[in-house]
Amino acid sequence: MSLSATTAPPSPSAPPPTPPRRRSRAITLNRLDLKLSPYLYIAPFFVVFGIFGFYPMLRTAWMSLHDWDLIGDHSFIGFDNYTRLFTDEYFWNATINTFGIFILSTIPQLLLALFLATMLNRTFLRARTLFRMAIFMPNVVSVAAVAIVFGMLFQRDFGLINWMLSLFGVDAVDWDAQKWSSWTAIASMVNWRWTGYNTLILLAGMQAIPKDLYEAAAIDGANQWKQFWRITLPMLTPTFVFVVTLSTIGGLQLFTEPLVFGNGNIIGGDQREFQTLAMYMYELGIENLSSAGYGAAVAWAMFVMIALVSLVNFLLVRRSVK
């Protein structure tokens, strides 16, 4: 055996030590990465929100303090546009219409969504995935198509709803000629379109509740009704508050459904029977270019209303489910 065959290969040389300056630089970069990278990840959202959300809000607030003409001059008038709101009958009419449709749509919508989510959460229900997909379908359909179909259903002379009412001896209703009837028609449209969306959100919250709580309650003798009130509703509070807040914002910003229901009439009927705040704001700020400043004041008034109603709903929901 040769000597070269028994000689061990030379051990690799140790890597040269890292210079202190390079080591401190790497530590600094690592610290900056840990501190700054989270902000860089969320920066795109805030940049987009700042351009398309926050800046328009500030711009609208500045416009509301002026007598603003979109194609002419504008002059500073302070809070005159806001004081004008208190004596504007069209503004209060739009406010009443908005809250009327909001109450008729939001409350039944949330109750029905809670009931459907509870049913879809049952383990004995067959084809649950099919029902969950089907219940979300109305939200996928175009709102214009929904409004056209419901407009045909609520026609005075040939509508299906009036035909069904005639079976019980009720005279034909001119649904878009009165406040209560137009509110009911628009609210039914909103309920049909958004109930499934809220149902799936509540269902996701229910499925996040630990099953051990229900098993322990069943062992203690609690029936399903007690389990719903003592376990489901308290544990579902954050999700339900989220759904209520979304429904409040969407209900008070209602625009497309009443606009299409009235065949594109921005004033909401011949006598403004169902003109909402969003429609009135559009009428002032877009169609009537000379009153854009007053339209901006209506927009901020609507923003304050939404914030206050959302806060009240938040407090009521948290208190009622405790």
Image (tube, rainbow, N blue to C red):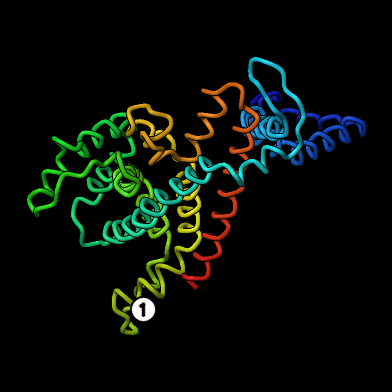
Q: Looking at the image, can residue 17 be seen?
A: no
Residue 73 spot, x, y in % from top left: 72, 18
Q: Quadrant of residue 312?
A: bottom right
Please state which of residues 9 and 108 is positioned toward the viewer in this rendering: 108
| Residue 99 drawn at (x, y percent) | 45, 50
Q: Secondary structure at mark 1?
A: helix
Front-lying residue, 311 or 182: 182
Task: Say which quarter of the image contains residue 48.
Answer: top right
Taking the image as shown, residue 51 lies to the left or right of residue 93, namely right
Badge 1: how crowded within 10 Å, few (<14), some, or many (20+)? some
Viewer can see residue 58: yes
Image position, residue 268 (x, y; %): 39, 35
Q: Decide which of 189, 77 is in the foreground and name it.
A: 77
Q: Which residue is mark 1?
A: 217
Compared with 10, 132 (above or below) is: below
- Which quadrant does the N terminus fall into? top right
Q: Residue lying at the far bottom in this picture: please name it.
A: 220
- Residue lying at 52% horizontally and 70% vertically, measured from the top left: 319
Name which residue type carries label 1: Ala
Q: Residue at x 50, y 58 (%)?
A: 241
